[in-house]
Image (cartoon, coloured by chain):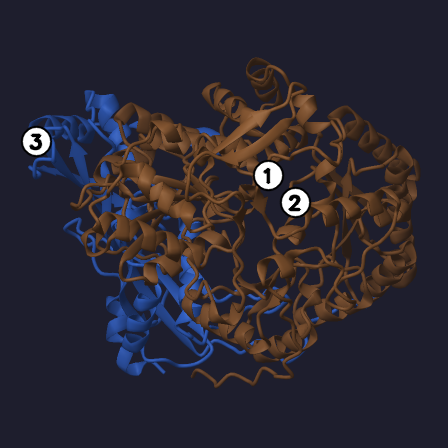
Amino acid sequence: MGPVMSIESVFSRLEPLLPRVNKPIQYVGGELNAQVKDWDDVDVHWALMYPDAYEVGLPNQGVQILYEVLNERPDALAERTYAVWPDLEALMREHGIGQFTVDAHRPVRAFDVLGVSLSTELGYTNLLNALDLAGIPLHSVDRDATHPIVVAGGHASFNPEPIAEFVDAAVLGDGEQIVGAITDVIRDWKADGCPGGRDEVLTRLAATGGVYIPRFYDVTYLDDGRIEAVTPNRDRVPARVTKHTVMDLDEWPYPKTPLVPLAESVHERMSVEIFRGCTRGCRFCQAGMITRPVRERSITGIGDMVANGLAATGFEEVGLLSLSSADHSEIAQIAKGLADRYEDERVSLSLPSTRVDAFNIDLANEFSRNGRRSGLTFAPEGGSERLRRVINKMVSKEDLIRTVSTAYAQGWRQVKLYFMCGLPTETDEDVLEIADMAHDVIRAGRTATGGKDVRCTVSIGGFVPKPHTPFQWAAQADPATVDNRLRKLREAINANRSLGRNVGMRYHDGEPSIIEGLLSRGDRRVGAVIERAWRDGGRFDGWTEHFSFERWVKAADTELTEVDLAWFTTRERDGDEVLPWDHLDSGLDKQWLWDDWQDALGEFEQDDCRWTPCFDCGVCSNLGTDIQIGPTGKTLLPLVPKH
Amino acid sequence: MARRVPDGPPPAPVVQRLRIRYAKRGRLRFTSHRDFARAFERALRRANVPMAYSAGFTPHPKISYIGASPTGVASEAEYLEIGLAGVVDAETLRTALDAALPDGLDLVEIVTAGPGSLAARMEASAWRIGLPGVSAEDATHAVATFMQCAEYPVERLTKDGKRTIDARTAVISATVSEGDEGPDRAPRAILDLVVRQVTPAVRPDDVLAALRGVAGLALDAPPVAVRLAQGPLDDAGLVGDPLIPDRSSFETAP
């Protein structure tokens, strides 16, 4: 905890360095809708970090939501901090400037809490670098009552074991309410005069049952390297920690005033989350599993957020976000209502679409009434129908061809298809069917357009098994297998030169996926690997030009003893194995996940509980939640003209 | 596949042209020209300005930027011109646009465009540059030596590699004065430059590179430069206000 006094800005010392670095605008703050509160007016100071470059971190919805929610509290303030690029890092180290926030350029070291949003495990080295730059001891056990409490959130925190040594706490699930509860605990503890030091405040947080404090749990191992048990090592600490679920999205219309960066960012648009959760049941999809149940924002709530957000930002594009936006129960009314409202306003609407059906094209047409029809994206995910049964992503090739034919006929010029490679039970033949599909798409496009120049882009990602999914037991494919399959696929696509020349193929090589796999399903022994990779220069591992597979392999070889990289990644787990995240409760029943894994291997599909009876995944019964979907029957009225 | 054309009537014509002076101040001096353009277009939308747009599927608002200052250089005198599809009150718009921009990108003045090109009035710029760690005496000596040269080629690093620029010919005047001491009590001379608008533009950095070359002038820290004025050059070698002709024709404007 910082002493109770005003904290000085580091900006006067940072400013002379900025002309010497690339894109200095990313470090100066001052964005539209940024907030700076007086340090001395509040009790609890939060630094919120997205551990990647500003251009990636700024648009992050989670950080923007918590930034507003916390700053609305009279007893708290929140400022933002992002990973600095190596050019500025070197200058900061040379000039003794610590990790700073971009809002008031206060040193992160002075805050009460450092909240880190971990969307991807590849941000771990950036987290370590920020801690080190901030002057915060890397290991939780070395920190005292003057240091910020480092709290991890975001999807990666559903298995925080690899970073258990580096964080003080982790929270699972929706952050809107738990950041308030954490603020209350810290405020009260400070008001009491910080009794019992850091240990006591962490114990109070653990006692809420909703904050995981890794150091209050001991992990024991079996002789074969597997985990024997994870057990609390003190009183007042629950055996399992539960995820948080916000139940009425209309009560949380955040961000209300989205941040508008001056620097160019990866998403130059405003985002409105139209629902949270997904029960499509795609077995590879961690997001779909850990964000259940489905909770829709109402059509009127969405309309208000779009109108207020546009007025607050001046953005000209609005993205309607969710895990499968076309599944909102009133999406057609939303699309028509928004398209009507903004027809003359030069606001473009977008819907990240993955569903393969004609309805999706109707929506896309509505959203592009007066605009260009450039590209549509569909995600069959698996190359063969058999594999799509394994992953529970049911779409037939006939459906796909019918859908893309409609799209091309209605003026769309390019279709993008997303797939994964390295899925459980996958063979070369499954992947090679992608080539046939791509060829058929081009044929269909030429037929539908009378021989015009249509394009199809096949985009392929390496599959990484994730905790809290039915594939959490699966063996990850090794990089050589994935690379080999993709090479054969490219040959198959190009084997027909006439069709192949209209097919683009995008993929990443398999090596980063294996490291992501290590970090995703690793246990506490992986922490030493992360620290070694960071000490050896690891930064920005999500960026191809900064990622070094050799560095990670060397770090794993050096730091892992009884188990190794392959043990964590390409090894299939048995049903009775204690998984590193078993004491973290996502609501999903482990037995249900196992049964679904067995169904996958048997190529049996699972329906969506929004439209069929409950299949007892466990979330609603374990967490006391339920599905919240429309239709509400309401419509969007025209906006009152502003002029 | 029939080629789609945008539905509806062609875009509304320009009925009013406005000329805008704005400033880039403080930490937002690190805003690049592209960054500013995005922020300005968003501000126009927030302020509900009835912009005129170009035709086509990706219509662009009618905005002409005039001689933007380099990234990292502050400015009190940046200019642009916008075309509107509806008539608005200039002062009301100034207030609304200023409120819609982040602090540090500030609207100074808006006038209705009179006849003639604004860009053509931009004959010269006045720059003020703080030189950290340099005494007025050393700066005066370096400037005197520099001004005695007829030409002074310097190399500038661009995206396409090195480019040689004559940093001297465009400099009309260079004056040194004593500045306040910096926070570290080091001297900080002030250099005032009037530089003719030429292509490629001669920037403060080019002149500093020349002063380093001609007299070994070295700074403790990066210089802090501000463009104070931009406009027509008078007989005395001073930079005037480029919006005077617009203001005087305001009464007769539509």
**Quadrant in the picture for the N terminus of chain A:** top left
Residue A605, numbered circle = none
Mark positioned earlier in the residue sequence (2 or 1) = 2
Q: Which amino acid, mark 2?
A: His
Q: Which residue is drawn at 36% across and 25% down?
A: A90
**Letter of the chain shown brown in the rendering:** A
Q: How far apart are marks 2 and 3 (CA)?
A: 60 Å
Q: Name the residue under label 1.
A: A581
Amino acid identity at mark 1: Trp
User: Do the residues bearing badges 2 and 1 touch, measured as CB atoms within 8 Å?
Assistant: yes
Left or right: residue A466 versus residue A154 is right
Q: Residue at the location (78% across, 35% down)?
A: A422
Q: Position of residue B78 (x, y in %)?
A: 31, 56
Which residue, given by chain and number where applicable, does mark 3 sit on? B185
Amino acid type for the residue under numbered disc 3: Arg
Q: Which chain is blue?
A: B
State which chain disc 1 sits on: A
